[in-house]
Image: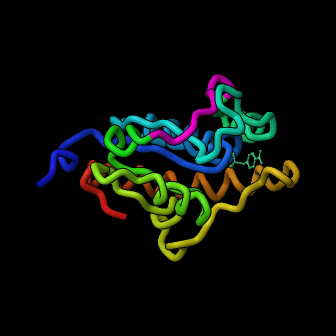
Amino acid sequence: MSQNDTATPSVLFVCLGNICRSPMAEGAFRAAAEKAVLDVRVDSVGTADYHIGAPPDPRAIAAARSHGVDISGLEGRQLAASDFREFTHIFALDHANLEGIRSREPRHSTAQVAMLLDAVPGQRGEAIIDPYHGDDAGFEACWQSIDEAVEALVARFAKDGAAARF
Ligand code: 4NP
């Protein structure tokens, strides 16, 4: 059993800009874990450096708020080499994000890297579509998909802890 198996799950969500999908995933996952009284760490980052230090997109904030989750205080951050040791699980929101993660993965990585929708039965390998160039309805659809996935994640972590494999 590796050290990660006994640790508190620590989860990093990764999209491109860290202003739309991954902050929504961070907020939705934190809310679902709190509801389940599950001890986890959570953060989100982008593969790109476009929005470092910026708050989430106002449409993402509004979508989260309409579901009772406040993500307005989050700040954009870019994926760092240290993330591969500090998090037990790193979830990509789409395939380009997965490529971006893999291309930065250091040899000393201890994190398990997967697609977020790998956690949802019947959706393994599928992507959360980037809503950035769309409208409010796209952000709501994005929230719904993310919310389904994080509920599945919480259920798996509640059962298997940091040893959960996706
Ligand atoms: P995200 O969406 O990766 O879900 O945060 C995007 C945010 C910004 C850009 C693209 C996608 N951008 O090109 O600036």
Name the spot of residue 130 as percent of width and height, x first: 73, 57
Q: Is residue 43 left or right of residue 164?
A: right
Q: Is residue 78 magenta?
A: yes
Can residue 70 be seen here? The reply is: no
Residue 79 left/right relative to 146: left
Asked whether 68 falls inside the magenta stretch, the response is no
Q: Nearer the viewer, residue 36 or 139?
A: 139
Q: Which residue extends farthest left? A: 1
State which quadrant residue 10 falls in.
top left
On the image, which quarter does residue 123 sit in? bottom right
Instruction: Give the position of the C terminus as an image quadrant.
Output: bottom left
Q: Quadrant of residue 160?
A: bottom left
The image position of residue 61, as x and y in percent, is 73, 34
Residue found 33% across the figure and 35% down from its top: 39
**Region of the chain picked out in magenta, as a range:** 72-80
Instruction: Name the spot of residue 142 as percent of width and height, x first.
Output: 70, 55
- Please give left or right for residue 145 compared with residue 57 in the image: left
